[in-house]
Amino acid sequence: MLSYFLRRLLMAIPVMFFVAVFVFLLLRLTPGDPAQAIAGDQATPAQLQQIRESLGLNEPLSVQFVTWIGRMAHGDFGVSLISQQPVLKMIGQRIGPTVALALVAMGLTVLISLPMGVLAAWRHGGLTDRAVMAFSVIGFSVPVFVIGYVLIGVFAVNLKWFPVQGYKPLADGIGPFAHRIFLPGLALASIYIALVSRMTRASMLEVLREDYVRTARAKGLPEIVVLFRHALRNAAIPILTVVGTGFAMMISGVVVTETVFNIPGLGRLVVDAVLARDYPLIQAIILLTAGTYVLINLLIDLSYALTDPRIRFQ
Amino acid sequence: MSVDPVLSVRNLKVATAARRPAEILKGISFDIHPGETLCLVGESGSGKSVTSLVTMGLLPRGELEVTAGEARLNGEDIVAATPARTRALRGADMAMIFQEPMTALNPVLTIGLQMDEVFRAHRAMRAPDRKAAALEAFASVGLPSPARIHDSYPHQLSGGQRQRVMIAMALALKPKLLIADEPTTALDVTTQKQILELIRRLQEEQNTAVLFITHDMGVVVDIADRVCVMRNGEIVETGEVEKVLSAPRQQYTRDLLAAVPALTPRPARAPHSQDRVLELIEVNKVFSLQSAISRLLGREGHSVHAVNNVSFRLERGRTLGIVGESGSGKSTVARCVLRLEDPSSGAILVNGHDIAPLQGQRALAEARRAVQMIFQDPNRSLNPRLRIGESLIEGPMNAGEARVAALARAGDLLEVVRLPRDSLDRYPHQFSGGQRQRIAIARALMMSPDVIVADEAVSALDVSVQAQVLDLLAEVQQRQNLAVLFITHDLRVAAQICDDVMVMRRGEVVEFGPAGDILARPQHDYTRALIEAAPGRDWDFAQGRRIPEPA
């Protein structure tokens, strides 16, 4: 298992290299000029040329690429073209809230959607099943900012149970942290709750037809044991896949939630960087996201072996 | 009998829970006494499995419901009991073992945990006592090294071992009633014999009443005290096993018994053709299991010799049976003949041409026409989304035949297999299993083959249907002068249709010769063991009497 893990990590290197090439070329092929963005509309051609030279933007693409990769190999991801700060430091400041938000959202997703999906499959065709399905259609079709504003309107403005906006890190204590992150977590989770509960339901419906479920019932086990110990573990693999990729998608897809709830996270940093053509920052964030995907995929694959003893890695 | 019955079923009716309910059980009644084995025997759809599910309180909710009658376990009506009460009875006072040991155990939980659940659900016992009881239960069903079994997962055990685990779980709390639903149907004959003996022995030790469900008359002979013959949700005949088998009162029972193929081989057919259509010369198939990394580093992988030096000849108009248990390599031989598998070495001559070295669909086209296949399960071998006509003409059209001409021939062939011509426009689900296997035969004939390979082609069918399909196969064989390679685990079927028999074990040919010689005077110990394990071999179904033991 350990050697499998290490081999998969080695395989991540070429993947990351291709991502780096792709990101680099993609940014340079899109219209827009960072020098123009820095200097503003009034800049003379001479000023623009000077800025380009100081940033190395007038070098051939291949030289720029090699320089960039070479610096990254030494841990230097570059300096933001706009703020002149190291991009790693900028990302470091913003990644905390985003990861916290994604973790809370995923936690809520699992806590809410697993029981919902299991219950719907158990009462297949009944009222509970139809309610869960209707709920998941809503979760899919209502945009996250609508859900966010509705949650704010109901629970923050009217009932005053939660603050309207803002973020406090976990270091400030679990109470303030949880108080502020619950609503944005729930808003972000809504679509994943819809997705995972449907997935759980479908997977459970399949497993509940299996012979070993009948065996478990024939032993006189309580239904809850039959459902959660015997059926759910066998239904877990597609659910794990969705939860894992969902988590990776959250890291890169939180911008709307962060904006609605005014959270200083990575999502908003990306948007600002893209609008300003801040090449080093965009490149670093996309590489980071790609790395997260690779790592999470590896973790998903490893988790298969933990739920199903028949899966062993060579 | 003065003792009260363990299970007493009275006028039990079950119907589908649809708007227009269909009756599945039409008022059946029977008793089972302590220490007695009652066999419910019948063909698919007769309602025998539904009877067992009612008794266990396991009817699928929202699909089937009891509409009348009662099923009393030790006097207590299970039909009227609360769900909590039936759950308390299940596993403790009544227990069940199922047909498919490969799927009846949960693949992601250890055997020990699954056993432990039985004790935890029904008894207040401390953990060490539960473990000791589990180990004892594993030992009592003859499992080797119970401690290792306890920590194993189901996929680490063989089919026979898994069925022993199921029996150990079922009998752990010494239930009064054991329901066995086709518990040996999925097992090899030698394993089946051991499992039947095990059930017998434990039943005698614990004085258990056994409700045994089977479609196999041979198994009935071996295990039943009394038998209920079921058909379409009714019990048509019931009585002591010897009486029912020797003097059946109902025509249906007589038909059922007459359909059981005899173990004594039919007289050999005289060879009338020297035209050798299929010949295998020292064919080997080695599967090497090698990971990508090992291949990269040139390391040796792990290999399995699935077919070891197999040679045989098959002439036009003859039937060769390949007989063996699971893992014997018989299906791999068939797949090599069809070139679905590439043989590792050796020659496969089809009409005199070696097809073993050929590569690519174009080179193999002639062999693909000459050798056709009939598969085991007609429910899965026909594409459910294609009309029968499309399935039949697909092969000939690939070979270049015009659509209209192929459809006309398909219609003719459906009549040959005794199906109406308009079946062309219907879908597979509109046919019964036997009809679908007729369609599969027609599909094979569409290519005007020289050889038909039939891999367990009648194993999934009820005995009466089995007989009809075998008759049809013999008829088309004669009409088209075909050679048939018939792969089966069933010695009775082999005895009735094969001219020659080849017995295989672990990839090797154990014995090969005329069916009459091999089955009547087996030379090899393994062949003898197979014949001895055939269920009901001491009963002559045609004459309705016990076969006297040879002195």
Image (cartoon, rainbow, N blue to C red):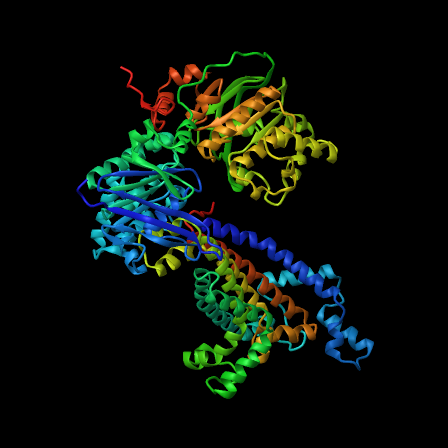
The quarter of the picture where residue B489 lies is top left
For this orientation, the residue located farthest to the left is B2
Q: Position of residue B426 (x, y in %)?
A: 62, 42
Q: Is residue B441 visible?
A: yes
**Viewer-proximal residue among A10 and A240:** A240
Q: Is residue B227 left or right of residue A277?
A: left
- Does A118 sit above or below residue B13? below
- Does B90 sit above or below residue A258? above
**Viewer-proximal residue among A106 and A273:** A106
- Can you say which quadrant of the picture contains the C terminus of chain B? top left
- Can you say which quadrant of the picture contains the N terminus of chain B? top left
Q: Position of residue A247 (x, y in %)?
A: 53, 65
Q: Position of residue B50 (x, y in %)?
A: 39, 47
Q: Is residue A119 left or right of residue B72?
A: right
For this orientation, the residue located farthest to the right is A45
The quarter of the picture where residue B510 lies is top left
